[in-house]
Image (cartoon, coloured by chain):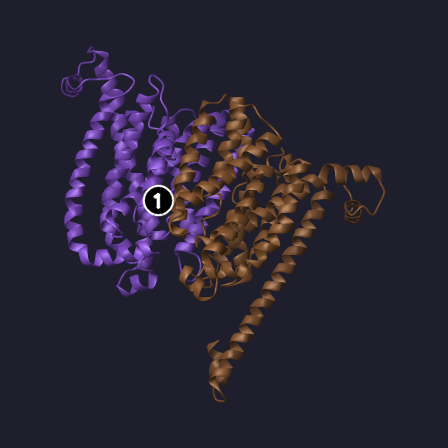
Chain colours: A brown, B purple
Amino acid sequence: MTTTTTTSDRRSAPSGTAAALRANRRRRAGRSLVVTCALTATVTALFVLTMMVGSFRIGATEVIASVLHLSDNPSVDFVVRGLRLPTAAAALTVGLALGASGTIFQQLLRNPLASPDFVGITSGAGLAAVTGIVLLQAGGLVVSGLALGGAVAAALAMYLLAWRDGVSGYRFILIGIGVAVFFEGLIGYVLSRAQLFEARQAMHWLIGSVGQASTTELWVLTAALVVLLPVATLLQRPLSALALGDDAARMLGVRAELSRAGLLGTAVVLVALAVSVAGPIAFVALVAGPIANRLLGPAAQGVLPAALVGAALLLTADLVAVHLLPTPLPTGVVTGAVGAPYLLWLLATTNRQGAGG
Amino acid sequence: MSATNQNGTRTSTGGVRRASALGPGLAVLCAVLALVGFLSVTMGSRSIGLSEVLHALFSFDSDGPISSTVTLEMRVPRTLLGILVGAALGVAGAILQGVTRNPLADAGILGINSGAAAFVVFAITVLGVRGVGVYVWFAFAGAIAALALVYAIASLGREGATPVKLALAGAAVTAGLASVTSGIVMTNVDALDELRFWQVGSLAGRYTPILTGVAPFLLIGLAASLGFGRAINGLALGEDVARGLGQNVTRTRAAAFAVVAILAGAATAACGPIVFVGLVVPHLARFICGPDYRWILPYSMLLAPIVLLLADVLGRVAAAPDEVQVGVILGLIGAPAFIAIVRYGRLSEV
């Protein structure tokens, strides 16, 4: 920017600066568009690939035709629509939801560690579900319902406890820590008192897997995404303003408390539904935002790219968990192993000051 | 926001008064710690009177009453370990929060717990190791390896180990290691059974050999940690200001991480991950002392063992003759207390 100014300041400095700013903004918008398109293409490719591989291999065109109801081949339809589509759709939707809600939390609370995993929302879901599994021997939809209720209850409790003439990010984080520690303590207690078989089942749920989703849950999550992802994208501008601090946001004409409540509500609904579908799959929400930010370049943050990164991460993790490992494992085991090295590589290679965060 | 401003103006006028009140406060905390330590020796599923304790300590004979054996072989080591481990985790948490300038930072999110857990699981499944006494050392090695990895990755690149990069590298290493651990655990029921008890965090069953094993590391680390107050105050002002004040930022960070690795590594190895102490107690200390790390560090060092021992005693008494792990009690009672303080108190930010 400085070089552009010095070369053009002989004619008129202000217009030169403005031109440089405009060029910079255009370049960033261009990069953001390219990154988003590339991510969309990657996610689509992974989505199709997930349905191609397996003990019965199917070509890409056949998969697409079957999903779109364009062909009429009963055996392919059975494998694709009956067996593989639910898992692939679960990975896609859960990944989108976790990525979006994670980055909203991180930007809103202005803390790269403040994903729903660490501020108590997923642990609320975890406690409800683990209690259901261990004490009530529940399974299936009951556990999902309990998890949904637990997450929403935890989020509501945190919001109310943190409320004092508005919600400050810092107090919300501290309250979140307290709530998370409380629930983790209870989960530990329930697990150490349980029989080994039920403890194993509960641990399995706590790790999370996309392979266990039922059609009803998937439809609910998909509907929520169709409504809430556009809402989150529209709320991107107040979100970026709030990331500068409440006072700055108010000066930019943002109704701070209202926007924050809206954003928190969106993020909580997304993460609660995602957890109820697939269990608290770790680190997708935490890692998606920082990865997207590093791809977008400095000072650019987007909900949609983060959601797409989340989906790509979860689809890859599902492929690795089911097809590459000697014994199939729950997806949550692999998300860390897939996402962590990539984030570490980005951290090691991105040298720019202030990138991400 | 407004809370910080009020706090800021208050400290500028009352800094001296504050220091004069905080000094005696430390003495009070020492007395409280002694009292809690005494409670921890005498109370439990089997109550032991003062005279019996003194008798056991000063004129012990192996054929004496069973209370002497209980005191010397179980209660005293357990109490000493609780004090050391609590102090270590508290100070380590305070240092990490200061260095990364992040209220969510603790030994857990910077990779220590997951490193220790990964090595413990490795020792159980691959090497067939059994028993807390042996895998303490695996946990210690794992914790140090994980923290070293986090620091190494975060310091790549031009500007070195910035707070954001440290936090993200820590989270990423934690994620990767947790994947490995849970992958092994899901396919090996024995390892799961050992790990689920290790993971809650407890002082139970850790007797003299473990205490004497980790005590030297903890004592050295604690002594070294107290010297960091001024340096972390500088870092808390931001890197550029710290450099302007003549601080070698890189060296301070590296030294702080080395101390934390020893403290939190040894403590986690001995007792498992006790999240509350490392994460929450530094916030309590900050709540009492304000933003000055020269006070936060000693306060964390004394508050943490008090909280830990109280929870331990409560866990022993509440469910006697059985016992509830400290981690659970801290979550159930400590967390609501912390929430109440955060809700109604005046905050000062990291």
Q: Is residue B17 above or below residue A209?
A: below
Is residue A74 in view?
yes
Please identify the quarter of the rendering in which residue B240 is found: bottom left
Count the labels in the image.
1
Q: Secondary structure at mark 1?
A: helix
Q: Amino acid at mark 1?
A: Arg
Residue occupying the point 50% across, 58% down: A239
Residue indicated by mark 1: B343
The percent coordinates of residue A243 (x first, y second) are 45, 59
Crowdedness near tag 1: few (<14), some (14–19) or many (≥20) residues, C-alpha within 10 Å? some
The spot of residue B272 in percent (x, y) is 38, 33
As drawn, is B225 to the left or to the right of A357?
left
Q: Is residue B110 above or below residue A22?
A: above
Residue at position x 44%, y 57% from top? B156
Left or right: where does residue B326 sit relative to residue B173?
Answer: left
Which quadrant is the N terminus of chain B positioned in?
Answer: bottom left
Residue pushed farthest right?
Answer: A72
Which residue is painted at 53% across and 79% down in the image?
A: A19
Task: Judge left or right: residue A192 versus residue B238.
Answer: right
Between A162 and B169, which is closer to the camera in this rendering?
A162
Residue depicted at 45% across the width and 28% down the height: B196
Residue B14 quadrant? bottom left
Expressed as whole percent of the image width and height from the top left, the position of residue B24 reads 14, 43
Q: From the top left corner, tell me how far across and down residue B242 is, in percent.
A: 29, 61
The answer to whether residue B185 shows anywhere in this view is no
Q: Chain of mark 1?
A: B
- Most extreme residue toward the bottom is A11
Foreground: B60 or B197? Answer: B197
Depth check, front residue: B60 or A275: A275
